[in-house]
Amino acid sequence: TVLSIVFLSARSRLSGISILMIFIGLSVYTIGAWSRIDAREVDPAFGRGEFARTTVEGIKDNWATGVGFGNFQKAYQIYEKEGMIFSKYVNHAHNDYLEIAFEGGAPAILLMIFYFILLFIALSRIRRHPLQKAAFLSVSFLLIHSLVDYPLRTEALAMTFAYMNAIIFHNGFAARLAQKNELIEVDHNGGKLFVPIATSS
């Protein structure tokens, strides 16, 4: 919460990026510690780490085109170790980036990289608008969470993610900031009113 407030109040590009990097680092550390605790409670070798290793093996064999979207569950079983087969089957990698790479191959990986480049460029553009910065922060939460789970496969969160991206990449906010309001004095029913008008800066 504290980092979120500081990020939203940051004005310069350097301070905003620095705060974001600290936030990401703390989030990854916290998520990693929680994953280790969760894995020990279930089985030392059966957890998100094993899901990731198995998925990476599948990516190496299908890096060009992937196994096809929606085929993770069946394709994962091909690479699953015998000692890791339990009554509960693995339906997701619990890492959306690895799962997308496994299913979509190189084209999907390139699209993810392209999106992150656009998002990083947008960060330098939106630093003066609180609403866009708040949307960026919301998107960051979901992207970090996607390292250890699949929040964007939940319809409500997927819709929120899309809406927040629309706010981030909307150019109307920048155009509004490029204008400044001036007041003009007008007569109205014997009185005087000050009416704001927008002029280009």
Image (cartoon, rainbow, N blue to C red):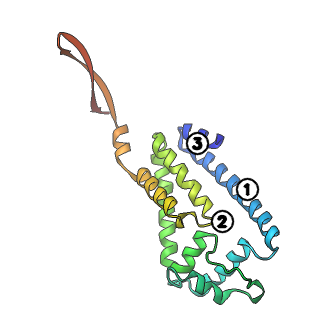
Residue visible at 45% across and 47% down in the picture: 125
Mark 3, other Cα within 10 Å: few <14 / some 14–19 / many ≥20: many
Q: Which residue is mark 3?
A: 7
Query: In the image, is 141 to the left or to the right of 197?
Result: right
* Between marks 3 and 2 in the image, the one whose residue lies nearer the viewer: 2
Answer above or below: position of 121 versus 71.
above
Q: Which residue is mark 2?
A: 148
Q: Position of residue 200 (x, y in %)?
A: 29, 34
From the viewer's perspective, is 183 left or right of 115? left
Q: Position of residue 112 (x, y in %)?
A: 51, 68
Instruction: Name the residue type under label 1.
Output: Thr
Q: Amino acid at mark 2?
A: Val
**Residue 145 appears at what percent x and percent y?**
62, 60
Query: In which image quadrant can residue 57 be found?
Result: bottom right
Mark 1, Cα crowd under 10 Å, few <14 / some 14-19 / many 20+, is few
C-alpha gap between disc 3 and disc 2: 24 Å
* Percent position of residue 118, x then y: 46, 59
Disc 1, SS: helix
Instruction: From the image, state whether disc 1 or disc 3 is nearer to you.
Output: 1
- Give the label on residue 30, or none: 1
88, above or below 118, in the image: below
Q: Give the side of residue 46 with respect to residue 128, left or right.
A: right
User: Is the residue 145 above or below the residue 86 in the image?
Assistant: above
Cα distance in 3D space between marks 2 and 1: 11 Å
The answer to whether marks 1 and 3 mark residues whose Cβ atoms lie closer than 8 Å is no
Q: Residue at x 63, y 51 (%)?
A: 21
